[in-house]
Image (cartoon, rainbow, N blue to C red):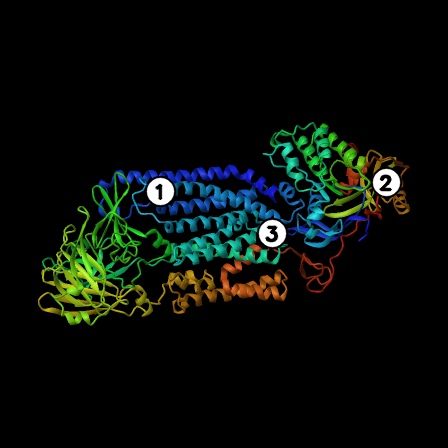
Amino acid sequence: MNEQSVICTRGLTRYFGNKPAVYDLNLEVPRGCVFGFVGRNGSGKTTTIRMLLGLLQPTRGTGSVLGYDIRDLPPEARARIGYLTEEHLLYGWMSVGECGEFQSRFYPRWNEKIFRGVIGHFNLKPAARVKDLSRGERAGLCLGLTLAPEPELLVLDDPALGLDPVAHRSLIESMIYLTRRSDRTIFFSSHQLADVERVADYIAILDRSVLRACCSLETFRNSVQQVRLRFPGAPPPVSNIPGLLQAFRAKGELRLTCVHYGAATEQALRALSPAQMEMVPISLEDAFISYLGERGEKSFILSETEAQP
Amino acid sequence: MKTLILKELRENVKLAVLGLGILALILALNAQKYSTILKNLGGISESQQMYLPWQPLVSSDILIGLFCAIFGAVLGWFQIHNESHRDLWAFLIHRPITRTGIFFGKVIAGLMLYVLATGLPLIGFIAWTLVPGHVAAPFQWAMLRPTAIIVLSGTLYYFAGMLTGLRQARWYASRALGVGVALFVSLMFQSEWHLWQALFFILIGGIILATAVWGGFHSHGYYRGQPAPGRLALTGALMPGWGFVLALTAILLVELLLRSPYSQTQYQMTKDGAIYKVTQGDGDQSNIVDLQGKPLVDSKTGRRIGTADFNRRVCTLGKIKPDFSGRAHRGRWFERDCNRFTFWRATPDTLWYYWGQYGRLVGYDIATRRFIGSLGPDGFAQTMSGDGSRFRFGDDRNGFAPASRRIINTADMVYALDLERRATKAIYSITNDSEAATPSAITNMPNETIGGIGEVSLNGNDWDYTIVVTRGYIRLLTPDGKVLWRAAYKPGYPDYNWIQVAFLNSSNQFALWLSPSWYAQGKAGGKLPTQVVWLDREQGVLKSIDLPELFHNGREFAREQKLISLSISPALMMMIPLINEQPQLEDIPWVLVRNSLAAALVCLPIGWWLGLRYSLSLPAQLGWAAFYLVFGIPGLLTFLSVQEWPARESCPNCRKLRVVDRDQCEHCGADFAPPEKNGTEIFELLVAVK
């Protein structure tokens, strides 16, 4: 394991019944980065996080977090890891203040200022009952409880899931301004690609239980490109294009999103004899969606209808 | 941990208060019922009075037991259920404290709440009982031992409830199987003879369940990933549950499908001294034949005698079950403690109990519910112990009411009781048995003591005769103590401990029935006969006959029992003698053990095959094989319910199916293939961000 890695897994696999939820995951998360963990629903993000924190036994494979075996994380390791769950559940009968007091008793490095700061940011009153809080407020409280122990590693499982835009923005701001520190690693999973784009240094993409990408955001952005091919008539069928992620067919036009665009891809595209071929700028979100979406050719129904004689 | 304990206390205190309220209500209703009984005593027949809850403290045991079991299980289950959502569970578990710390935090708080909910109402109830004027019955602290044990056993249900909430299992209902351990221990109370046995079973059950729960905290309720003691305990915790499920299923199936028609034959004697075999089946009419098998017919009509007609011809019987053991109390400690006093009789204004601690009848005033005094051989005294003289009322109840209410005895004297006048009168002494015995016969028997007495009423009300049994003789007395006849008690005690005197048409003629004890009959394989002797007061013994046993078949087991034994673990079968006061190896029902073992042997190859499917190591296979042998079918089902069904997939190297939880194929040693690449992978070496 690289000493700079905060999280490291080797062949980490988890089955539920006969179905693999995470398959042969090899991952290294460098220290001090913000690491986005991206994937569609059911791709295995939460399962991975739960395995990393020793909340779920891996079926096979190994892993370590902060140098500790994930199968047996000792209390001192847990004290250094902050974990924010996706549903932000807490004890409903406690008040906000009681939650802080309860949590503070377990953490020697508890920073009351941070806790007060975060709940203040979310306008939470210490006397308010947890059961009366909105989902966004609960998320803020959970974030405060997670940050106040000043964890070295922050694991956030889809922290913005189910939040309204205001709460979402508030949480992301907190993540950016309150959590980011040079000695802290943030590992977060998300559906919100814009969030990933805003805060992540590195990303890992899980696709149907398998890790398909693990790189910097820049590398990912550079690796996924879109090319537009124009044809005088109906575009020919697309097949055997190296690195093809998705192809959209429109009238006299093919728009192809490819990964690792290079000479081989270009040669295959030229073989289609387009009248014109040009690179099209692609947003990171589109790149993500193409990367995570169904592979192969897609057609606009209208274009297909128009193509009918 | 203190923080966790406080959190648990606060989270579950409402449930504890609810439990406390329910138990307080149960006990208050019991107290109310007791008061109602005292008010309406005049309207309750003497035979029903025997079974009234005279001491509400001990008569509440069943309700308290039920409450403790249900409340304990619900409390334990709730403590886990409150945090059963995976995110809340993660919030609890992911904190800098060991799983053991979390386990203890929960358990300490849970047990504190359990003690609060059960202890406070009970202490209040005990205090109420102790205040004079509330309960007109004897009290001693030892009476509380069964209640204490019952409350203590509720902790087993508490752990079982926790285990149910915690356990993750693919057979959903199998989560609750841990309750089997608690049930097993509760059932053992019914047959335990000593206090230490009850405490021992609670301790063992508690250790098994608590360790299983502790293991569950380490693996979030899964078997896999638990420390070895946790896995062992979980296996042990589920096995009795399966035993119960299987036994109940087997009993149900046998009852529904295989049950033989009910039929029981017994000997009965008519007033003319003739013996008949009466077979009672499922119908109303009995089959009545004489000892030669000839049906009993009416001499006038020539038709078979019906049951009702026959019952009118049956003679009156005086029954005695003597006890020469010399023990003040007999029976299970559980029962013994409840029966430290025995209700004797009520007069219009007083209640009388025989209290073994003092060997005297103690009286209470119904109106004031206060102690009024005691009756002993010396007469009435205003203290419990009087002058220290004691009656010898061996606990001849054995589940029955005392055979006599008008008379009582010491070792050598029989006394008539006059409870209305609070007086006793000696009516017979075996040392002055001049009427029918030679003094030398008595002196030759140094151990001659009275082992049982009984009063006989021919019309159901009057006191016509008294039966007195000593080791050597059975005597029939008039109510004023005159000996009518004396017969040798042979075959004697303890093998023959069931004595019946039949009163025939002629006032001078009687028949004496001596029947073997159930235990002796069992040891003899059902071969001990019942001896019947016809006696004439003037002429002595007229004749005698040995009747073969009809009911007890010794070591023979019914087909149903044999079938049910297939579903029970061989180890449990071997434990059957433990329900006896003095367990003996010969009490083991080897026929049933053999059946059970045969079922276990069938489980062995099935279990071995399953082990191969799970790709267990050889030591694990051998360990489980031993488990199947000891615990039979319940053992096999336990294996299936603790282990997750293993996912398997085809090995790309050898093409055989291999389990997925190994890094290498168990057949060819090949690694798992990495995920197939599709050409879209983007990987780069990541470096730490400065």
Q: Earlier in the sequence, mark 3 or mark 1?
A: 1
Q: Position of residue B313 (x, y in %)?
A: 14, 57
Mark 2 lies on a secondary structure that is helix
Can you tell which of label 1 and label 2 is closer to the viewer?
Answer: 1
| B559 on left or right of B508 | right
Q: Is residue B645 above or below residue A165?
A: below
Q: Is residue B214 above or below residue A196?
A: below
At 67% from the left and 60% from the top, the residue drawn is: B658
Q: In front here: A262 or A21?
A: A21
Neighbourhood count class around disc 1 (C-alpha, 10 Å): few under 14, some 14–19, many 20 upward: some
Q: Position of residue B417 (x, y in %)?
A: 18, 52
Q: In front here: B51 or B598?
A: B51
Neighbourhood count class around disc 2 (C-alpha, 10 Å): few under 14, some 14–19, many 20 upward: few
For the residues labelled 3 and 2, the Cα–Cα distance comes to 42 Å
Mark 3 lies on a secondary structure that is loop
Does residue B553 appear anywhere in the picture?
A: no
Q: Position of residue A159 (x, y in %)?
A: 71, 37
For the residues labelled 3 and 1, the Cα–Cα distance comes to 48 Å
Q: Quadrant of residue B673?
A: bottom right
Q: Amino acid at mark 3?
A: Tyr
